[in-house]
Every structure is written in structure tokens, then in C-alpha cells.
Amino acid sequence: MEHRPSPQPLPAALTAPAEEGHRGLYPHLDPGWASISRGVLVCDECCSVHRSLGRHISIVKHLRHSAWPPTLLQMVHTLASNGANSIWEHSLLDPAQVQSGRRKANPQDKVHPIKSEFIRAKYQMLAFVHKLPCRDDDGVTAKDLSKQLHSSVRTGNLETCLRLLSLGAQANF
């Protein structure tokens, strides 16, 4: 018989209306879901798109109706509170790097196709993640990133770990 943790009270920061820049697609909406693998909170509407991406890209869990192990809840709280969304939207946040024609979806936009295309670009294609320079003499490889991740995990710095994963570090290194 599998032991399921009992539902834990959620930190107020996870259930309160979101602050600008720290809550997935629409920071002003009250999020009902968390993407555990991306460290962001999402609304009911966007949850369906996250589910369609597959569990290998985004694992979603309801904030109020799911059982949360305390350590997992703390991880999501820490990542969401410290701006995990800025990792996934890096190039959209820097005016000097804004790609022509790319913009964040608006709350008024329809889920299909606008919001779903944006979410796919953001989490599946990693279109807005900071890219490392690709020079022959650079020497930064997935192996190097994976070694950094292995070291970073021991420090408990979740934001650094998430950033390294977004750059291509392998979790199973």
C-alpha cells in the first residue's frame, strides 16, 4: 500500500494573488496549479496546456486538492518566490535581447492558439531561455553543465540548479 502524504497547509505566498514577475504566465491571476518541473505557478486555463506538453516537460499538481510532501511544497514555493519564471522568459525580460515579433501572451488572448503556442515555445522549445555563447573555443558542454549541477545540488541553491537544467545539464549525470 502506497503512503500518500496528507495535504499540508499551503504557504500564503502560494495561494495569494501573485506578484508581478513571479507567477508563470499571468502574475495577477490566482494560480490553482504548480508546474513542479518548471518551478512556476499556473492558472486553471494554462494547466491544460502544461498537461498536453507531457510529464517529461511539465509535471503539474493542484495547489489545494493534491497531497504535497513538505519538501516538494517548499521547493516550489522557493522557486516561484525567487523568480523561476525569469529563467524561462529571460530574453523577453531584457529589452536589448527581445526577438522581433516575440511577445508574452496576454490574459485576454485565447488559449488556443495564442497561449498554447507561447507556453510550448517557453517550456518545450525553451525559446526564451538564456543561451550560452556557442564558440568553438568556449568549451562549455552538457557534461560541464552536468558537473556544475551535481555540485550545485549539494549547496541547496534551487535557482542555480533550475538555471543549469534550463541550459541543458543532465539531472541523471
Image: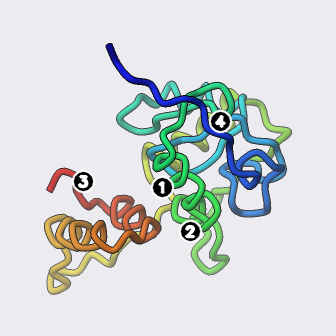
Q: In the picture provided, is 16 more to the left or to the right than 126?
A: right
Where on the picture, by quarter, is residue 10? top right
What label does residue 161 carry, if any?
none
Which quadrant does the C terminus fall into?
A: bottom left
Residue 122 placement (x, y as % from top left): 53, 49
Q: Amino acid at mark 1?
A: Ala
Between disc 4 and disc 2, whose residue precedes?
4
Q: Which residue is mark 2?
A: 91
Residue 11 placement (x, y as % from top left): 69, 51
Residue 3 placement (x, y as % from top left): 38, 23
As measured in the structure, the alpha-carbon distance from the residue carrying label 3 to the one carrying label 1 is 20 Å
Q: Amino acid at mark 3?
A: Ala
Where on the picture, by quarter, is residue 9? top right
Residues at circles 1 and 4 in contact by the CB criterion of under 8 Å: no
Residues at circles 3 and 1 in contact by the CB criterion of under 8 Å: no
SS under mark 4: loop
Between disc 2 and disc 3, whose residue precedes?
2
Question: Which residue is at 74% across, 41% downward?
Answer: 31
Other residues around mark 2 within 10 Å, as few (<14) / some (14–19) / many (≥20): many
As measured in the structure, the alpha-carbon distance from the residue carrying label 2 to the one carrying label 3 is 24 Å
Question: Which residue is at 63% across, 76% downward?
Answer: 94
Question: Which residue is at 72% across, 29% downward?
Answer: 45
Q: Which residue is mark 3?
A: 171
Between disc 3 and disc 1, whose residue precedes?
1
What label does residue 127 carry, if any?
1
What label does residue 63 carry, if any?
4
Q: Amino acid at mark 2?
A: Ser
Q: Which is more foreground, mark 4 or mark 3? A: 4
SS under mark 2: helix
Residues at circles 2 and 1 in contact by the CB criterion of under 8 Å: yes
Q: Nearer the viewer, residue 79 or 132?
A: 79
Q: Residue furthest top?
A: 1
